[in-house]
Image (cartoon, rainbow, N blue to C red):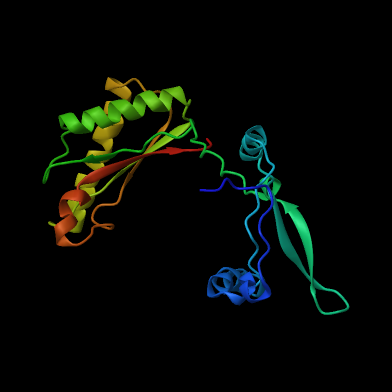
């Protein structure tokens, strides 16, 4: 066995590496990559700290067209700061504190008696009406279409008067209360007749 020397032996001309099949296998892929425009990977000189800075502070820039073309017919492009162009969030809906829920008070068939549910609804309404300093209140009585028109109108009036009396005597409201009776004028189909036996309570602005 001979130790290797520092000088590589020269190859004869007929032993040139380019004349060997192995050499062409190494050269052809590189040539194809060059011809197709594929660039070889390069090692980035960006440091880890620079990577962190880029991730934390990305540049919010986008290139968009202005809709105008230059003299060559090419679209004019500008850079836009996307962070400034981002749409603002819609404002939170403002709930008015001067509006009270206007209750519907329901009655049994042929009755003008306030049940526990009706009294509870009226109590909540009266408390709210005082808090917003209501100026006027309207109570409107209704009836289903069973019976004569005269009977239903009278029953609707009795229901409205019962609500008015409860608001004044039991709940202590002192604002003007307007009483109206519609009888069966606004009755619906038979399925909704139980909802027609009602009194509507609402706030009225102005004197």
Q: Estimate the x, y position of residue 63 in percent, counting from the top left.
A: 72, 59
Q: Is 188 situated left or right of 56 in this image?
A: left
Is the residue 14 above or below the residue 164 in the image? below
Q: Estimate the x, y position of residue 59 in percent, counting from the top left.
A: 69, 45
Q: Which residue is farthest right? A: 71
Name the residue rendered at 26%, 27% in the picture. 166
Residue in the foreground of this view, choosing between 125 and 155: 125
The image quadrant that residue 123 belongs to is top left
Q: Is 123 situated left or right of 21 in this image?
A: left
Q: Is 10 situated left or right of 112 in this image?
A: right
Residue in the foreground of this view, choosing between 2 and 179: 2
Residue in the foreground of this view, choosing between 23 and 202: 23
Q: Estimate the x, y position of residue 150 in percent, counting from the top left.
A: 20, 54
Residue in the foreground of this view, choosing between 183 and 91: 91
Q: Estimate the x, y position of residue 162 in percent, counting from the top left.
A: 24, 33
Residue 145 in view, yes or no: no
Name the residue rendered at 15%, 32% in the picture. 115
Q: Which residue is farthest front? A: 1
Name the residue rendered at 29%, 21% in the picture. 169
């Amino acid at each position: 066995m001979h130790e290797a020397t520092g000088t590589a032996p020269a190859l004869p001309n007929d032993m040139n590496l380019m004349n060997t099949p192995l050499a062409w296998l190494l050269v052809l892929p590189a040539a194809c990559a060059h011809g197709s425009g594929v660039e070889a990977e390069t090692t980035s000189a960006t440091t880890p700290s620079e990577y962190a800075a880029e991730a934390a502070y990305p540049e919010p820039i986008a290139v968009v067209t202005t809709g105008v073309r230059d003299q060559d017919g090419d679209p004019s492009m500008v850079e836009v700061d996307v962070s400034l162009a981002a749409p603002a969030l819609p404002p939170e809906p403002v709930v008015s504190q001067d509006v009270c829920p206007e209750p519907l008070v329901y009655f049994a068939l042929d009755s003008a008696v306030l049940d526990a549910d009706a009294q509870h609804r009226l109590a909540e309404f009266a408390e709210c009406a005082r808090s917003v300093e209501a100026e006027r209140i309207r109570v409107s009585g209704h009836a289903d279409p069973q019976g004569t028109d005269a009977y239903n109108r009278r029953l609707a009036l009795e229901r409205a008067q019962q609500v008015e009396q409860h608001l004044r005597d039991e709940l202590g409201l002192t604002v003007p209360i307007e009483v109206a009776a519609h009888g069966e004028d606004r009755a619906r189909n038979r399925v909704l007749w139980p909802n027609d036996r009602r009194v509507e309570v609402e706030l009225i602005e102005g004197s």
